[in-house]
Image: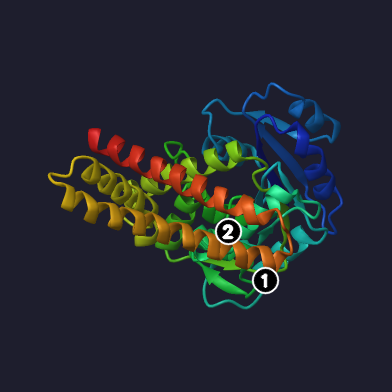
Amino acid sequence: MISILIPTYNNAKTLKECLISVQNQTKKPDEIIIIDGHSKDETVEIAEEFGCKILFENGGSRAAACNVGILQAQGEIIIFTDSDCIAKEDWIETLVEAFSEEHEGIVVAITGPNIEYPNESTFGKAVSAVYQSFIGGSWSEQSQSIFNKKKRYVSSAAGCNVAYKKEYLEEVMPFNESLITAEDTDINFRLIRKGYLLFFTPDAVVFHQRPQNFKSLRNKSKKYAKGKIQFFRVHRTGLEFWHLIPPLHYITLILLGISFLFGICSFIQHILLYIFSGYVGLYIVILLFYSVILTIKYKKAKFLYLLPIMYIIGHIWWSIGILQEIFKSNEK
């Protein structure tokens, strides 16, 4: 028996397409469970139209929704996706069949890529382009799940595209509701720590809508940065030097600016001005370099001005999220 779990909150704009794709699968799920955070739009009404089992969560987080859904799910295999995803028609079939492949150990979770919508907006395509560049995080596990097309064992699985064997998932339940994000990384880490394996198959595809405006991009950057620090606080791992480069960059920029303003003599101020200008100039050159390369690669003229702004907004709000959560943890 297969259960599909979809956490939602005010996702009426995308939920219908998501549910159509789930119902049109070559291998049908036995139940579709919507776990709603008390939406104020038509999310619940749309779920009712499709005959979904509807549950409600009061924790205000994706982790809380996952916990509520799993308690009620009847399937031996639990498959998660998001309400802003469209599943390829053989998605469920591919996930389930991957469990029966020959593996090096006990595989308890199968995951696949989440690529951009087929009709993705120009802004959304630009976000995908940012994800593919080094200064946009192409080295991260999250980006690798989008662009790396090799079958392999992985250290995490995105919550928008993952199937679990329920009996093993229950060994490490519940999902950590104190995490603002990274609840999927957390549960996967606990499974791996018990000696189980997670497997990535590139053929189990969902199309995942990217942020559609600067506000959404800003909020996502800040939220995921906070989740990164929260996860590290719990497990003392998962935080790499690359995650700290944006806040270190802006701290250095601020310190150079302050030093220039309060230089003890004009000579030192001149030296600091040259250092500050060179530092800012190098950053801008790097942003423009990646922006030009990606503009040429995707043949999208709008990328030339969209991408530099996206990089700056992403870096600033990632830095704010990292620093806010670090100071928050120090206060405790």
Q: Residue at x 73, y 59 (%)?
A: 300
Residue hosting label 1: 100
**Nearest the camera: 207 or 310?**
310
Residue hosting label 2: 131
User: Type of residue at label 1?
Assistant: Ser
Q: Is residue 156 visible?
A: no
**Nearest the camera: 45 or 56?**
45
Element type at marker 1? Answer: loop
Q: Is residue 210 visible?
A: yes
Element type at marker 2? Answer: helix
- Looking at the picture, the colour scheme in use is rainbow
Q: Where does the image place residue 56, in percent across and percent down from the top left?
A: 63, 27
Of mark 1 and mark 2, the one earlier in the sequence is 1
User: Type of residue at label 2?
Assistant: Tyr
Task: Please indicate whether residue 211 sits to the left or right of residue 182 in the image.
Answer: right
Marks 1 and 2, Cα distance to the nearest angstrom?
A: 32 Å
